[in-house]
Structures are given as C-alpha cells and as structure tokens.
Amino acid sequence: MKRLFILSIDGVPYSLLTSLIDMGVMPFFKSLITEKGFRRYNSVLPTISSVAWASFMTGKNPGAHGIFGFIDRRPSPFKLYLPTGKNLRSKTLFEIVSDAGKRTISFNVPMTTPPRKVNGVMVSGFLSTKLHSAVHPPEIAQKLEYIGYIIDVDPSLALKDESTFWKQVYNALEGRKNAVKTFIGQEWDMFMLHIMETDRVNHFYIHNPEKLHSFYTELDHYIKGIFEYIPDDADVLLLSDHGFCSIEKEFYVNTYLSRKGLLKFKVEDPKSLNEMDSSTIAYSLIPGRIYLNLKGREEMGSIPQGDYNRVRNEIVDMLGELVDNGIIKRVWLKEELYSGPFLDEAPDIILEPFDGIDIKGDINRKELFGKSSIKGMHTLEDAFILWIGKELKGNNSFSIIDIASSILDELGVGRPPDMEASGCLA
Amino acid sequence: MNRNEGFVVWFTGLPSSGKSTLAQRLKDELIKRGFRVEVLDGDVVREHISRGLGFSKEDRDENIRRIYHVAYLLKRNGVVVITAAISPYREIRQEARELLKDFVEVYASCPVEKCIERDVKGMYKKALAGEIKNFTGIDDPYEPPENPEVICETDKETVEESVKKIINKLIEMGYIEPTDEDVYTEEEEEIIKKRLEDLGYI
C-alpha cells in the first residue's frame, strides 16, 4: 500500500495558480501538474478555513461535524465563543487512519487545536498560541523550537511593519520545510503539512500583483525544497481550501437587519451581540450566517416555535431584494446546505456572497457598505487540487467534503459509515 | 478542595456595580456544568435572614456573618454558593475567607459615577437627595479588596467577558473542570481573538 503526502496550501485560488503558471512565475509547481490530476473545485459555505478544513478532515458537511465558523454562539445563555478542535465532533482522517493501525504525521492543519492523540505526531495550527500545548506527543515541542518552527505569523504586521511581516512569513515557511526535513524520516502512512502563510499574504496583497508575484516565486522555491524530502514511494496530493479575490466592498448584514427593524439593541452604541434586545427577530454572525431569535432556543427568544417557518420565509423573501440588487448571490435555508446531528446549531439562513462583496457581521456600522484594511476575501468555487498521477472528477464537480473518502480508499483504510463518500477520483 | 464540598464565589462591589447580574449569569454557567448552585443575593438575604438589621457598620457586619454562615452550610453539603452583597468592609470579608476556605473573591469594579448612572433600584437618587442615610458609595465607605481572585471591570467588560474571567479562574484554581469550550486561558483567547480580528474573521 502506498503512503500519502498531503501538502495543503491555504486559500490559493486555482485561477491565480494557472495565471501565475502562464506567466512563468511557478515553474516547479507547473512541473508537478499531471493533466487529469489538476482541478478547480468547490469549498463549503460559509467559505472559511476552519469550516473547510473541518470538512476536509472529516469528509462531512458542517451539519455533521459541528463547525460553522471561527466564531459561534451558544443560544442560551447567549454566549459567543471561538470554536476549536474540541467543537469538531467527529473523528478526523488522522484518527481514522490511526485506528486502522497506520501512523500519521501532521503539521499546522486548522482546527486541530488542541492536538488529538493520534498514532504519530500532530502539531496544531494557528488556533494555538504556544508550541508546548500545540503538540502531540509533548516531547517534540523542544525539537520544533530548535528548528525554528513557529505556529503563525502576526497578521497585524502586514499593516504596521511590512518588512517584519515578510520576515515572519518566510521564517514560517522555512520552519515548515524544516519540520518536513526533521520528521519525514519517521515511520508514516499519511503525512500532512499545511501552509497558512498563503492565506495571510492573500488577505493583504491579493490586489498587489507585484508583491504577489514575488511571494509566489518564493513559495515555488519552498515547495520545491519540500519535495526534495518526500520519498519516491509516496503519492502526493496538493490542495487549497478556497479561492481568493479582491474585496470591492464589505456588506454589513447586521446593519441591514437593524434598518429593517429585525435587530434591536438595549443600548445605543452596542459593543457586542450580548447587548441585543429581547425584541430582536434575527441577528447575524460573520460571514452571512443569520439566526432567528427563536423562543425556547435563544436566551431571549421572541419568535414562537410555531411561527418559525413563516418568519424565516418572510426574512428570506425580504433578503430577495439583496439578490435582485446584486449584493448577495443566493439565500440558503440551513437544511438545503447541511444535514446531520448538528443541524440545530447551524444558522437558520445562510447568505452566499458574490466574489468581491465580503459579508461581515459588524454591529456598529452606520452604513450598509464599507471598506476595511483587509483586501482579499475567500471564494467558494475556485479552490485547487492537484493529485499527482491520479484522475480527478471534472472541474467544480466535487467539493472539499468529497476528498477524505478518496484518501482513505488510496490508503486502503475503510470509510466510516457516516462519511459522505462520493469521492473526488474519477 | 474536598470534592464532596462546594466552593464560594464571593462578589463584592458598590451598589449597581453589576454583582447580581454577574451572579445570575455565573449561576447559569455553573448549572450548565452540572453543579448545584445557590445565589445568596444581598437584597433577598436582607428581606429574609437579616430582616431588621440596619446599615450601621455593626449591622452590616452581622448581615455578612449570617451570609457566610449560610454559605458555609451549603458549601459543606456540596453546593456552590454565589454571594452577591455589597460587603463593603475588608475585615469581615477576610473573616468569611478564613471560615469558608474555598473562597473566590470577585470584585465588581465600577466607578461610582457609572453606578449612579445605572442606579438599578433608584437608591442613589434617594441617597443623593438625602432621603436615605448610610448609603455605600455616597455617605458610607466602601473598601475595595486588595487581592481579590478576580476583578471584573463592569464598566468596560461585557457580562460574558466577566463571567469568562471568573470561569477561567475557577478552572485555574481547580474548582471546576475545563469543558470543550475552555481550551484557552483568558490571555490566550485574547491572542487568538486579535489574530482572527486582524484577518477580518470575527
């Protein structure tokens, strides 16, 4: 049975890769492409790395793994919290492969904080703050420090100290490459290295071709460097979790709901959704997740259970004007997108954005539209996958949920019965 | 901690500083985690256990002694007790700490001006108009704790943030177990929040 090396590169769009390759910017990556193994494919809604990688690791939709965003809410008592791997309520590829008696090594995969006790090594990603609590087994923390491995760059530096930002980006990439060099000699059946720096760079420089070209030129060198360590007997899968595009404008859903009289606060200048008034009908969390203030579910619910469908349909009808005006691409009901044991925790309505109009959850914006220092946003239909030497299904004919089952097939590990197993291989 | 026993979260702070609100929210959070919880609210205690006591220092101290004694009985029987009384004097709070032992002092810190603005029960208005005497913060002293386990700045923090602080301290002190949501310390959560904010993710 072959082993599999997975190089996940966060937020790299298929369209950007192909245009960079056409311009001669990424010659090494180009040399890896096999005709039927390189595809444009779909992420998930909401298009957020935590949701996307949770879907990748579990082979399940968010309704079945329980991750719907980087921030979520407990409805009663009302509480906003930051979901971690603890809230990912499903076995992941790493455990499934471990349980089959195989050994896995993974670095930096989002939503693996805190690390799970797999058969092998797990180093958590950017939802961790310190290496010593981000690693399994604990004794490898010191080794990682020694090789200069860092968890994440400080994204705020991109705006206030650009040269330090770039230094950190390249230090992080160097650390990731060194991690491969250091651990590749161990026994493993599935090795996954996640590169997060691409997402960080795209958020701040997607609009800047010059800086983007220079970064992707360097990235190509790092990928080449990593490939030098990958043994010949391993298959290699490269993929991103979503695409990216420039932000034309941000759209503030909570401001919209307030203007429609659906969201009300107890105070004039609220600091958080905790200050919602009990007469609220609906509120939103980033990006485009709308929750009804349902009695019996929400702490200060205002909508009787029996009115749920009527009120939700009325709100969907109202949101139709955003679709008609080209602000929102589509309005989804939760059951149209999700299924599984955590459907109840899903937003009642999900807004699918147009590329370029970033849907935000701010509560203190006076205008419906605005801009911030963030230049790039995620896109749903422009992730890339390159499974060297394999034949993938057609462009955009599968999503990130479909990959796990094919990985298990390739590793000769049985698919769990609750995995959504349509697969990505032709 | 003897695991068969409870513990006491002792709120102290000016009138209208947010003690009762925090106590109730903390109660919900601890019940959710499977604890038996009783709130001894200053107003309720004065209506029942301490009826007839006034607001002289002696009467205030006696009121606190009754509260900590009831808290002691409840704690001994495995109940988590949350007290929400002004408890303005350091000395009597120290007495409570020594008797109760499993004692977590939470200072609901809020400038008196802000408390006057809130004036939940309309008492500041009366005190300022001279209609009532010996009102803490106006014509009666309040001695802030010197080393409380937790300080909640209720004029700056949301209720949720303050409760999170208390929960983290209770985890740190070993009174409660972390749950799925308690991966981070307060400081770590701030780091992650900032990182996510800088990326426009929250």
Image: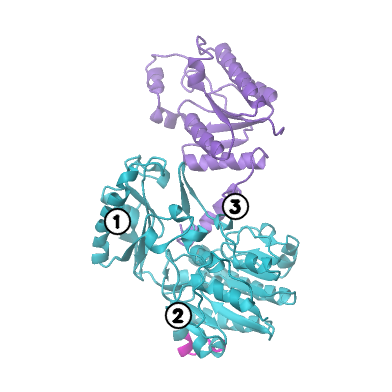
Chain colours: A cyan, B purple
Label 2 sits on what residue type? Arg
Q: How many marks?
A: 3
Does the magenta run of residues contain A25?
Answer: yes
Q: Is residue A69 left or right of residue A230?
A: left
Does the magenta run of residues contain A218?
Answer: no
- Mark 1 or mark 2: which is in front? 2
- Residue A51's place in the image compared with A27, above or below, is above
| Same chain, labels 3 and 2 | no
Q: Quadrant of the N terminus of chain B?
A: top right
CB of mark 3 within 8 Å of CB of mark 1?
no
The residue to which callout 2 is attached is A40
**Tag 2: Cα neighbours inside 10 Å, few (<14), some, or many (≥20)?**
many
Identify the element where label 2 is drawn.
strand
State the separation of the CA atoms marked 3 and 1. Answer: 33 Å
As drawn, the label of residue A285 is none
Q: Residue furthest top?
A: B52
Give the extent of the magenta segment: A20-28
Q: State the residue at coordinates (56%, 49%).
A: B181
The residue to which callout 1 is attached is A367
Identify the element where label 3 is drawn.
helix
Does the rendering let one see residue B202? yes
Identify the element where label 1 is drawn.
loop
State the separation of the CA atoms marked 1 and 2. Answer: 35 Å
Label 1 sits on what residue type? Glu
**Tag 3: Cα neighbours inside 10 Å, few (<14), some, or many (≥20)?**
some
Query: Which residue occupies the foreground of this view, A177 or B24?
Result: B24
The residue to which callout 3 is attached is B188
